[in-house]
Every structure is written in C-alpha cells, then in structure tokens.
Amino acid sequence: MDKVLRLSVSPHIHSGRSTAGIMLDVIIALLPAAVAGTVIFGLRALLVIAVCMASCVILEAIFNQIVKKEQTVGDLSAAVTGLLLALNLPAGIPLWQCVIGCLFAIVIVKCLFGGIGYNPVNPAITARVFMLVAFGSMTVQAFPTVVDTVAGATPLVSIAEGNVPNLWELFLGLKGGAIGETCGLALLLGFIYLLARRIITWHIPVSFVGTVFLFSFFMEGFDAIKALSLILSGGLLIGAVFMATDYVTSPSTAKGKLIFGIGAGFLTFLIRYFGIYPEGVSFAILLMNILTPYIDSLTAHKVFGGRKA
Amino acid sequence: MSFFLNGIHVPHRKHTVDQSAVRMPIPKTITLPMSMHIGAPARPIVKVGDLVKVGTPVAEAVGAVSSPIFSSVSGKVTKISDVLLAGGQSVPAVTIESDGEMTVDASICPPVVDSREDLIEAIRMSGVVGLGGAGFPTYVKFNVEPSRIEELIINGAECEPYITSDSLTMTERADDMEYALQTMKKHFGIRKIIIGIEKNKKKAIASMQMLAKRIDGFSVSVLPEVYPQGGEKVLVYHTTKKVIPAGKLPIDVGCVVCNCTTLAAIGTYLKTGMPLVEKCITVDGAAVRTPQNVIVPIGTSLAEVFAFCGGFITEPEKVLYGGPMMGITVPDLNAPVLKNTNAILALTAKEAKLPKTTACIRCGSCTNTCPFGLAPASILLAYKKKDTERLEKLSVETCMECGCCSFVCPANRPLVQTNKLAKALLKETRAKETSKNG
C-alpha cells in the first residue's frame, strides 16, 4: 500500500460552527453596549471591562493548569463571562471587587462544576447577585433605576409637562445604572445581530420583556409610556437578550424557551413590585436557570412517528 | 398530527450536474463480493477457471432476502476468496479477469412477464437492489399483497452533496423508468405514483414532468432543498403527509419507496433481459482531477475508476462510497464499485477536516435540526451511562443516521456516531433478554 486512507464514521463534513465562533459573535453583539457604557460613564467603565475580562480569562487558565485540565480559554466563554459581568457593574466599582466577582463567576460557578457546559446557573448572573449581597452598599447603585424613574415625577406627570423625550433619553441610556444596561439602543443592536447570526432565537428575549411589559402595563393603570419606561429601566434588556439566552442554562426547544421567558418575566415583575430589592432581573434569571432541566424534560420534541404518550 | 421536519442546508458541491455520463474503458479485472445488498450473502455458482460473459450469473440468491450477482465483463474466473468490505465484514468474492471483448451472454433475453408473480420473480432475477445506497433487495419490497400498495413513491431527492447520478437517471433514462412503471402498474395494480425531487434539479423535474404526461396517476412532487430530503420517512411524509410510525416500514402506511435509478435498472432488465451489471456513478471530491459521471462495470476497482478520471491532483485523505453525510470510507483503492454505489468521492485533507471535539454547550442545535425531533445530546449522555431504559425512552431506534446533528454541533461531538452505537447496544441488550427468557 502506497497511501494510507483515513477511515471514519460519517458524516465526513462539518458546518464549521464552533463554540469559539459563537462566543465571538456574543462579544461582537455586546460591543455596542460596551461602547455606549464607556461614552456614558467615562473611561473608568472601560477599565472595569478590561479588568473583568482579563480576570475571568486568567482565572480560568490558572484553574485549568492547577487541576491539569485541557486549556479551555480559547473557546472565549470566559471572556464573554468577564464582559457580561462588567457590563452589569457600575463604572465606579472598586477593582478588587471586580476580581472577587470574577473569581466567584469563573471558579465557583463554572470551573468547579466541570467548566463550560456543566454550570447549572449562569456565571455572570450569579456573580452579579453574589456581589449585590456581598458588597451591597457599593453595588446597589447598579440597581437604582426602577426606583429612580418612579421616584421623581411620574411619566404621566412628565408627559403633562411636555417631557416626552425622557423615554428617548432612557432608550439612549442617559441615566444611572450599570455600565452596559442603560443604553437600550445598543442592546437592541446586539439583539438584532444575534438574531441575524442565528446565535439565539427571539423566544426568550421577546417573551421575557413582553411579560414584564404586560404586567407593568396592568400595574401602572394601562399607561403604555410608563410601562415602556420600566422596560428600558434596570437590567431587563441586557438580562433578557444576553443572560437569559445563555445556552447552558436555558431550555433548548422553542416551547421551553417561551416558558423560561414568561417565567423570568413574571418573577422580575413580582420582585420589582413586591420584593425588597428594587431590581429583580438577576434573581429571576437565576431561579429560571435552576428550573431549566425540568422545563427541558417537559418540553422535549415529540419524536416523529413516536409512540403516543 | 402535523409535523415540521427539520433538517439542514448542506453545501451542494454538485460539480458534475448536467454533464452526460462517460463510459469507462473495459477494466482488466473485476471483483464481485457476495454481499452487495442487505440480507444473506449470495452463493457463488462458478468455479475458478470458468468462462463467463456479460450477464452470466456468478452467484445465486440464498434465502428470502438476498440477490443474485452477474458478471459485468466477459472473461475467466481467476479467484474466489474472502475480501474485507468497507463495513468491516469479510465475505467471499469472485474475481474475473476480463478478455477485453465484453461479449454478451447468449442466454440474455427479455423475461416473460404475464402475472404479478412473474414480475416479482423478474425483479428478483434482475439482481436489482436499492441503488440509492441502502442495497435492500427490491423484489422483497414489492412482494406484498397488491392491495396494500396505495402509492409508489420514487426517490429522486438526491439530497447528499456532490452526487448527481440520480439526476442523470431522471434526465437520460426516463424511458427505462417508464417501462418499469407501466409494467408495475399493469401487474401490481399501482394507481398512484409520486416522484419526489429537490427543487434545484430543474432538468430532472422537467424530464419527469414530461414522463408524467405519459403515465396515468404519475405526479412530480417538488421538494425544498433540505437535507435529508431523501430519507425514506422524510420523503414519504413530504409526498403523502403519511407518518411512518417508529419501527415500521413504508408499506405499513401503504407506500413502497423506490429510488429512481433502481426503477430504471428494473426497466432495463424488463426491456432487454440485461441484469444489473453496470452503474452510473458520480466521481468527485477535490482530490480528483476530472470530476464526472462515469458508467462503470460493477466490480471495477476504485483505483481504475479514479485513474480514468485523470487520477488525483493531491493525495486523498479519505475515499468514500456515497456522499459525505452518510458515505462509508474505504480502506484502500482496491475496493470495487458495488451494485449500490452511487458515488465515489476522494476528499482532500482540507475537505475532510473536522474540528476538534469540545464540551457540549447545550445549544440545542442537535435536537432543533433533527428531522425526527430526537435529542442526540441526551442520547450521548445516556449511552455513556449505558442506560438502555433511557435510550429506549429517547427513541434512539428511530434515528435514520442522517448526520445532521453531528454536522451542526459547534462542539463537533460524535452525536450520530453515538446514536449508531446506542442502537447496536439496544439490539444487543434485547437479544440477551430474549435468549434469557427463551
């Protein structure tokens, strides 16, 4: 035999999609929010982003080294976690707290459970909640918006005073909050990019935000403007588009995704209106993360030609 | 109940489309393995030293599911010994040295077909098996109570990348197909015939629409270009909206599915008496200098076919029988062209490159692209634990092994590969249980 041929089981071609490619698309989709955050909150925001991304990547690399696991930082998922966490923090946060948050996200939530694909809850969301509890007084400024917008003149009064552009300012992100969560426009661009690249489907973001809108609309006496301002407030958009759609911790099927989105929306509404915390998006996603395996098993596809259940 | 069957968009790479087939020169030797079909291997009826001609039977069918084999050249039997097939089984094979004459066997004449039984026997004696790739002996499919056949579904989907030989059958062998169909209509009482073709095969569709004008009850169903459109259950569903239950056959919903080239081969036999001795195959892959459709005597070595197509530009990394989604790799180029070979591909290292396998990120691509709605990622987990109960619940046996799941998996996990193992495991477990209880 002059030439050895490779033997393998079909298929012999591949779509070319890869985990790293997907993560890169998520990073690209987050860039508008990162840029907007830097413009709105200054270069300090950029520093927070850089520190978080670097911390997450380095910590995962070190962890893999210590436990002698194959290096996984090349899949860019640690970078995504770092970026997402940073965008959920206020620009003024002490950098040492950033590092602690990253340590929690990457080592405790992700690596100790087995690394990418094995974490039961979203690392960035869980770290955000952890930081809120651990460094409450300093991080709470990342959660002010719902209270703030409701505190001053209500939108109804604002409209009466001819202040309609407030909603537009809200959409552009000219308000307090975490680095990446304030600019609705930037997040919308990211959402469109993720849809166009078929990284995510519309189901979770639309059902999540839609549910919050409907309940707010009802609670605010059918005031669409006020309900809209509540949609644009807090971490709802970044949570619904980027955190709730994390593959690992959300359901796989369309039906499951709708249940997840509606559930997260309902929980957000409950916490916002009846809980002691002003913002409920993170808690809502975290709770739905835990329910994901159950939703998945309830909503598995019906097998073609399968036995009738 | 209505389903939406998912699938994937594969790269077409049909470089040889709309090219006429080229007949290759007479090969020096041919090798005929006794197993070119599903079922019992055929039994050789020639001895070393026997003289054979084109169409001379060299092996007879054994048992209810088998198929006879005929010489594709004239010459002398030089060897009968075991060969290793690409699938790993070892079977006897008859080697014939060609005399370069291609003299046709004098006994070749059209079969006399006056009844349903005659027609089934004729299809059996034609040596025709499922030429789409499966190799299931065709006469077995038709050997049912005629009233059970509500529809004959002809498979002209040709959804695998590269392959164009079925398209060529539809454009150039419509007469052979017609002859077979008219005979079947007469003796099997088939009233409804539907041919399913993917919509990008314009010429084939036009040719079959012409044929539809000549045959009563024949219609062309134009299908979207979604792999695996040619999967039996997918095709039946898209042409008739009938759902074949898991573990059942098309006939259980009143359908017989037959590939278009299979039909043409039956037509040739009924018309001329020449059994299946040659195949039109697509020769392609980036390693091949001149990709083209070639008419090849069955048993010709792949080496000779590739040499006829200008040899290799670069050394191939993998050589396949069939398309890149479901094809089987061959260990070396001495492997012969078989009855059910519809294409041979020589893929370069670049073409055949697969990404590294990494951890599952639960993206759901596998279950969302599976035409049957299976959950390959869950099947993989259950297989690792050898949890046969869970595997059964996940209906792994429904898997047609189309490979969509592995194709789309961003972590390139061995999903369809594990499905195959899981199916084998279930079969084995069941056999053990039966032997324990029996």
Image (cartoon, coloured by chain):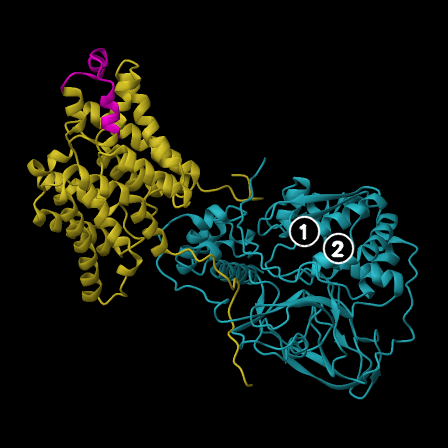
Chain colours: A yellow, B cyan
In three-dimensional space, the C-alpha distance between marks 2 and 1, rounded to whole angstroms, equals 10 Å
Queried whether the magenta region covers residue A142, the answer comes back as: no
When the figure is inspected, residue B140 is found, relative to residue B362, above or below; the finding is below
Determine the secondary structure under disc 2.
Answer: helix
Q: Position of residue B266 (x, y in %)?
A: 81, 60
| 2 and 1 marks on the same chain | yes
Q: Viewed as shown, does residue A202 lie left or right of B231?
A: left
Q: Viewed as shown, does residue B241 lie left or right of B43?
A: left
Quadrant position of the N terminus of chain B in the picture? top right
Queried whether the magenta region covers residue A154, the answer comes back as: yes
Residue placed furthest toward the top: A160
Q: Chain of mark 2?
A: B
Comparing A164 with B173, the one in front is: A164
Q: Position of residue A62 (x, y in %)?
A: 18, 63
Quarter where residue B54 is shown: bottom right
The circle on residue B325 is none
Determine the secondary structure under disc 1.
Answer: loop
Amino acid type shown at disc 2: Met
Q: Position of residue B430 (x, y in %)?
A: 54, 59
